[in-house]
Amino acid sequence: MAANVESMFYVREKPWHGLGTMVEEAPTSADALRLAGLDWKVIQKNIQVVGGERIANYKANIRETDGSVLGVVTDRYKIVQNEEAFSFTDSLIDGDVRYETAGSLCGGKKIWLLAKLPDTELVGDKTEPYMCFSNTHDGSGAIRVCMTPVRVVCNNTLNLALNSASRAWSVRHTGDIKTKLHEARLCLEMANSYMEDLGKYADHMANTKVSDDEIRKILDEMFPVDDESSERSKKSAEKAKQEYMVCYFAPDLVNFMGTAWGAINAMSDMISHSEPRRKTANYQENNWRRIMDGHAMMDKMVSLLSVKA
């Protein structure tokens, strides 16, 4: 992933790849744009073959500062500039926003920003809601925005999908982007509703008792093995269960011991901080994707606990 990070800044704590410019306080959008190395524009140019014949219905997205080709897109593709992304985020939360990190991936093809919203509490725990905005200039993905609450005491994310409130929104680079961004603002103004519903869900799960035997049964479903499984698979499953139990009995969860909320937070802690079993070249990029989409293991844990609740 480090090789894919072109530029970025971060506040106080050095990120996983050790790259970027550290700042003491989260900056405003104007500073963030510059510190993240995102103060450049994308322009579109026609594409032609050798000999000069134009390729119809397609254009190249090009970074204006250095002429880098970021991607080939159709005529319907509408550019959302980096500056517009920050302006959108500012207007979404009335300009009172500080950016914790932002940057560029894959030579400018992908950009992201993470903005901190006012603190709140979930069942007595200080929680910091963040809004993550990601965009692509290569035509590979949609404009994405999502809410990501972080439990401060252990710095783990609570990206829980709720049936009652949306956490994320996306739109493709087609049509009237300004109108769609306006619709996004209306949608994400429901962020308070999401946090309110998350608070109700957390309170319900904190009052739902779960025994140690039930936790073990859930872990057996999370990490299944049978007689035909290889020794490697059995060892991997056992290691995962042990890692989870270490998180489950962690001091910061003592107030939620024996509850569904404690079980959920233990899984969040495990997937947020444990070393991956397969440290592939793009595993950290996958972690960023999970900020937007959620994590399959978390979703499964929530689903298994919801049956009991």
Image: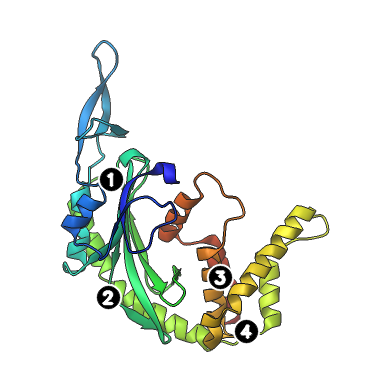
Q: Earlier in the sequence, mark 3 or mark 2?
A: 2
- Mark 3 nearby-residue class (10 Å; few <14, some 14–19, many ≥20): many
- The residues bearing labels 1 and 4 have C-alpha atoms spaced at a distance of 45 Å
Identify residue type, mark 3.
Answer: Met
Q: SS class of the residue under badge 2? A: loop
Instruction: Give x and y (percent) for residue 30.
Output: 16, 56
Image quadrant in which the C terminus is located: bottom right
Rendered residue at 18%/52% (across/down): 84
Residue 298, horizontal then vertical, whole percent: 53, 67
Give the residue number, with chain letter if any, for mark 3.
267
Q: CA distance from mark 3 to mark 1?
A: 35 Å
1 or 4: mark nearer the eye: 4
Kindly identify the amino acid type of the residue bearing the numbered disc 1.
Answer: His
Which secondary structure lies at badge 4?
loop
Q: Earlier in the sequence, mark 2 or mark 1?
A: 2
Which one is nearer the viewer's eye here, 42 or 179? 42
Marks 3 and 2, how far apart in space? 25 Å
User: From this viewpoint, is residue 44 visible?
Assistant: yes
Residue at x-position 56% and y-position 70%: 267
Mark 3 and 2 residues: CB-CB less than 8 Å, in contact? Answer: no
Identify the residue under disc 2.
118
First in sequence: mark 4 vs mark 3 = 4
Foreground mark, 4 or 3, reads 3
**Residue on which the image places disc 1:** 173
Q: Earlier in the sequence, mark 3 or mark 1?
A: 1
Q: Which residue is denoted by mark 4 in the rendering? A: 210
Q: Amino acid at mark 4?
A: Val
